[in-house]
Amino acid sequence: MQDGRVYWVEDISKINRIQGQLAEINARLSEENELIQAENELKRQRAQIEEKNRLMDEMIALVQPQLLQINRLLEEENAQALNVQNLKQVCLLGAYVKRRVNLALICDQKTVVPVDELAHCIQESLTYLTQYGAVCALHQEGKGSVSSRDVQTAYDFFEDCLEAALPSLSALMVRVECSERFSIRLMMEDAAGLPKADKYRALGKLTIDDADGALCATLSPDWGGVRA
C-alpha cells in the first residue's frame, strides 16, 4: 500500500500458456480433420474405382462369348479376302454386345424395368439381321414392367436362339408379351438349330414347337414348367 493506494498484480502467464496450448491443440485438430477428410475422400474414390472395376468385370463376362466370336471373325478377315457375311455377323454380334452391356447397367440400378427396354434391344439386333439377309419382325403386346433378372434372361434367350439359327436363318418373327404374363416367342424359318436349352429348361420356362413349318421357341417366367 502506497499513498493510500492498493496495487493488485495478477500473473497471467499461466493463462497465456494455457491459451497457447489450446491454440496448438486446435491447430492439431484442424490438421487431423483435414487428414480425416482426405482419407475419407480417398476411400470414396477407391470405392468408386472398385465399383467400376466390378461392373467392368461383370460386363465383360456377360458378353465374353460374343467378344471371342468377333475376334475370331476379324482374324479370319485379316487372313483372307474380304468376307461380307463375316462383317455382317460382326455387326450383328456388336449390336448385342452394346445393347447387352447397356441393359445390364440399367438393371444394376433397378429391380424392374419397362419391357420397352427389351424391345429396343431386340429391334436393334433385328435391324442388323435384316442386313444379314433375313426377313424380320417384332410384335409387342403390353407396356408393363419386368423384373431385371427376367428381362436380361429374355434377351440372352433371344441372342442364343439367333446365333444358333444362323447362318441359314431366312426369317425371324419375335413376339414380346407383357400383360397378364411376360413371355418372348421366336418363330424362325430355315433355322440351322436351337441353342442348348439346359439352362432355360432348368428354370422351367421353355417350350419348343413347330407352327406352320416354322421352328418356335418360347420363354415365359410365368409357366413354371417345361412345355414342348
Image: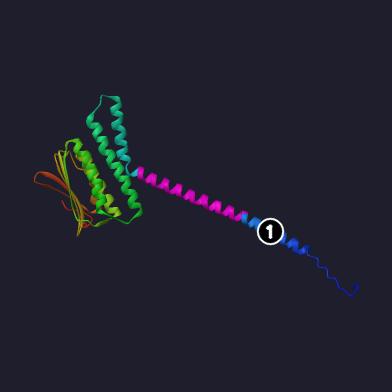
Question: In the image, is residue 41 part of the stretch drawn in magenta?
Answer: yes
118 displayed left or right of 44: left
Query: Which percent across, then down, holds residue 206?
Result: 20, 51
Between 19 and 80, the one nearer to me in the picture: 19
Query: Which residue occupies the extreme front position in the image?
Result: 3
Label 1 belongs to which residue?
23
Between 65 and 148, the one nearer to me in the picture: 148
Q: Which three-letter amino acid code belongs to the residue tagged 1?
A: Ala
Query: Which percent across, then down, holds residue 31?
Result: 62, 54
Q: Which residues are magenta?
A: 31-60
Query: Which residue occupies the extreme bottom position in the image?
Result: 4
Residue at image position (69%, 61%) is: 22
Residue at image position (12%, 44%) is: 214
Name which quarter of the figure residue 13 lies in.
bottom right
Query: Which percent across, then down, holds residue 88?
Result: 24, 34
Is any part of residue 195 visible from this angle?
no
Between 181 and 224, the one nearer to me in the picture: 181
Name which quarter of the figure residue 4 lies in.
bottom right
Name which quarter of the figure residue 93 lies in.
top left
Query: Which percent across, then down, holds residue 194?
Result: 19, 42
Q: How many marks?
A: 1
- Does residue 169 lie above or below 143 as drawn? above
**From the image, which quarter does the N terminus lie in?**
bottom right
Q: Colour scheme of this structure image?
A: rainbow
Name the chief secondary structure element in magenta: helix
Question: In the image, is residue 92 part of the stretch drawn in magenta?
Answer: no
Q: Secondary structure at mark 1?
A: helix
Residue at image position (58%, 53%) is: 34
Is any part of residue 119 visible from this angle?
yes
Between 82 and 54, the one nearer to me in the picture: 82
43 displayed left or right of 88: right
